[in-house]
Each structure stands twice: as C-alpha cells, then as structure tokens.
Amino acid sequence: MFQTESKLIKKFPPYVFAKINAAKLAARQKGIDVIDLGMGNPDGGTPIPVVNKLIEVIQDKKSHGYSASKGIFSFLKAISRWYERKYQVQIDPKTEAVSVIGSKEGLAHLGLAIWNPGDQVLAPDPTYPIHHYSVVIANGKLISVSLGESPEKFLVNLYRISSKPGVNPKALIINFPHNPTTLCAEQNFFKDIVTWAKKRQVLVIHDFAYADITFDGFKAPSFLATPGAKDIGIEFFTLSKSYNMAGWRVGFAAGNAKVIASLAKLKSYMDYGIFTPIQVAAIAALDRPEVELTERAKIYEERRDIFYKGLMNINWPVPKPKGSMYIWAPIPSKYEKMSAVDFSMLLLEKSAVAVSPGTGFGKLGEGYIRFALVENKSRIRQALRNLKKIF
C-alpha cells in the first residue's frame, strides 16, 4: 500500500470538534432549530465602504494577477498608520510588517520559518489550537504552561516552568484578550513579559485577534506598545473579528524586523500573497473611524450582559469577560463528572445549543465549555430558555 500519511500528520489527534459538528448537522437535518454558539464566526456584515472598495478594485483587470507575497506596500503603510494612530507605536512598513492570510496561517508558517526540529516553545493551556499546533507543524517541542485564573498567575507558572532544568525555550506564544478563557492583560503584564524574555533571550509572539472587542471601558493594550517589545517580539492581528471579515482571510504580523523577514522569506516560497483587491479593501477597513469599532464592540457587550445575567439566573456561575466574544463556562456541578465533549453533546441534544468543548483548546480545558456570542440578542435569550431545561 502506498504511503498516505506523514509522521507529522499522525501527530495530529482527531479533531475534537468533529463529533459536535456531526451531531449539529444531523440535528438540523431533522429540522431541529440549533442555536450555534460554537464557532467564533462573527455574524455581522463587513462594513459597506470596505465591500464597495473591493468591488471597485476587482473591476480593474490589472488587479487580477499575482500579488506581492509580503503584502502590497500601500497595505503595509496602512498597518503602520494603524499602529501609530491606535497605540503610538512606530512600525517601519518596509521591514517591520508582513501580510498574512489570517493570523492562523501566519502563526503556522512562522514556526516553520524560525524554529528547528526539537526547539522548545512555551504556550498557555488552554489556548487557541494553532498556538499549540504551530509548534507541532514545525516539529518543535511544545511545553504547556497553565494559564491559571489571571495573567499574574500565568506569569508565576511561566517563571516556574522556564526555570526548570533542561527547559531552554526559543519562543513564547501568548494571546490577550484570550481565546477561549476571555482573560485580559494590562500593559504592566507585557512589561514583565519583555523583561523575562530579554533576560532569557526568548522570542515573544502575541496573537492580538480580539484587540477591539473589549467591554466596560477596558482598552486592550498592544504588546508592541511595551518599551523594548520589538527587540524580542512580534504581534499578529487579523481583520476577522474587529471588522467582521473572517472569510476574507487577511491580517498581518508586525514587530521585530529579523523575525518578519524570516516569515516573509518563507511565505515568498509558499504563496503569492493575498488577492490584491482584498488587500486594498483591508486598507479601507484599517482606516475606518475608531467609533465604528466601539459600536461593534458594544453589540458584543450587550450580548455578554444578557448571556452572563441569564446564566447567573439559572445558577450557572461564570466569569464576566472584559474582552473577546466568548463566555468561558465551567461545567455545572450537577454535571461535573461528565467530560467536556459529553456535556457539549448533552447541551445539543437537550437544549439545541451548540458549544465548543474546552478540551478543544488543550488538556486543561477539560471541565469547561466555550459559548461564542455570535447570535443576536433574541437568539441568545432563546438559548438561555433552552439551557434552563437541563437544570
């Protein structure tokens, strides 16, 4: 029999969400109205001026050829403007920024560009899957660090693990506001990370996907706004969440010029860049007024308030998020002996509500599920009525 799997692909476990997705599809085929709070897929439309810019540019046949792998220069300049306007950070568009086909692609390729087989990389547990599997793809050695209940607790765990004999990490991957737990960090946290990273000579990779989805007056700080951050790190941003552009697959990495150069070099062999009209439309998005982002975040904040209050009212206590588009919920005591996958299946079968089991985000996600706030307020209220049935 000819070979059909590499050693690398055998390292990937069965997709933990597959069982839920299959059951969700089967329920819908039976006519059941499933309220899908599983995937973090924004339900709002891309801003009309951004869509119109795409339509305008796509009608020019000159825009239909291969694009620049690193990103067209006008997009790279828009990234520089974005950082200057929002975070007072100076980014050189020639050397310190590169486009990515969504931050997930960027993170996956970054590992191949900078790590050697066996290199140790630290990442939180639980966390967004590509933070772990970018290490697996690059044949690195993942060292999981318990995220804990706060960024400060994560720092304690990070210091403890990184000081163990034989631990010599090449990189640290972090993500605040955090998916899936919703933890948010202040600028002082990043200052401590920079101090630690410089002392240990560790590259820091910050995934800033939820930069603009914050609540109660909290503003998420950029890692790159920390003094010295560019000396030892980079930051990824995707337009998926802030601008309702998940399917467009456009984002960027910015920061340390040498790391950006390595990623850009690899990408020059791997792809021909994002379709030019999408990059031009992304420029239009990045240059949109800040008030639009605030209004979009307000929609998620209203949903959070309804869902949080509703869960508390049915005696399901959960942390109240300051950012992201999720609720990270411990499995209720009545069902605490169930696995996260089995409890997620129960919610689907008994309440017609689809969620993500915590184990999809790492071993320490066991005992939790994640709700995504991706349905309107009416549907969220319906989900709460449905969830009440299991209590």
Image (spheres, helix red, strand yellow):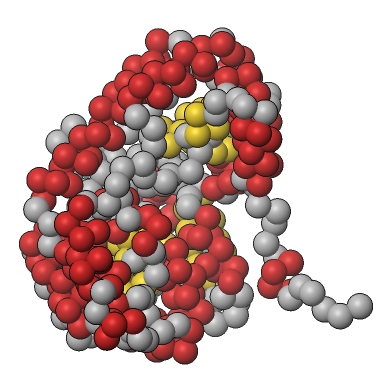
When asked about the image quadrant of residue 197, the answer is bottom left
Front residue of this view, candidates 311 and 282:
282
When asked about the image quadrant of residue 377, the answer is top left
The image quadrant where one finds the N terminus is: bottom right
Q: Position of residue 64 (x, y in %)?
A: 33, 81
Q: Image point 29% across, 40% down: which residue?
A: 323
Vertical position of residue 314 compared to residue 300: above or below: above
When asked about the image quadrant of residue 235, the answer is bottom left
| Residue 21 left/right relative to 125 | right
Q: Position of residue 8 (x, y in %)?
A: 69, 72
| Residue 250 left/right relative to 91 | right
Vertical position of residue 203 compared to residue 338: above or below: below
Vertical position of residue 140 compared to residue 285: above or below: below
| Residue 129 left/right relative to 241 | right
Front residue of this view, candidates 234 and 28:
28
Q: Image point 74% across, 67% down: which residue?
A: 10
| Residue 193 left/right relative to 106 | left
Q: Image point 36% across, 21% down: which residue?
A: 378
- Marks counted in the figure total 0
Front residue of this view, candidates 147 and 47:
47
Residue 2 can be seen in this image? yes
Q: Position of residue 287 (x, y in %)?
A: 12, 62
Front residue of this view, candidates 76 and 9:
76
Q: Position of residue 346 (x, y in %)?
A: 65, 24
The image quadrant where one finds the C terminus is: top right
Residue 368 can be seen in this image? no
Q: Residue furthest right?
A: 1
Vertical position of residue 125 compared to residue 283: above or below: above
Q: Image point 58% across, 71% down: which residue?
A: 137
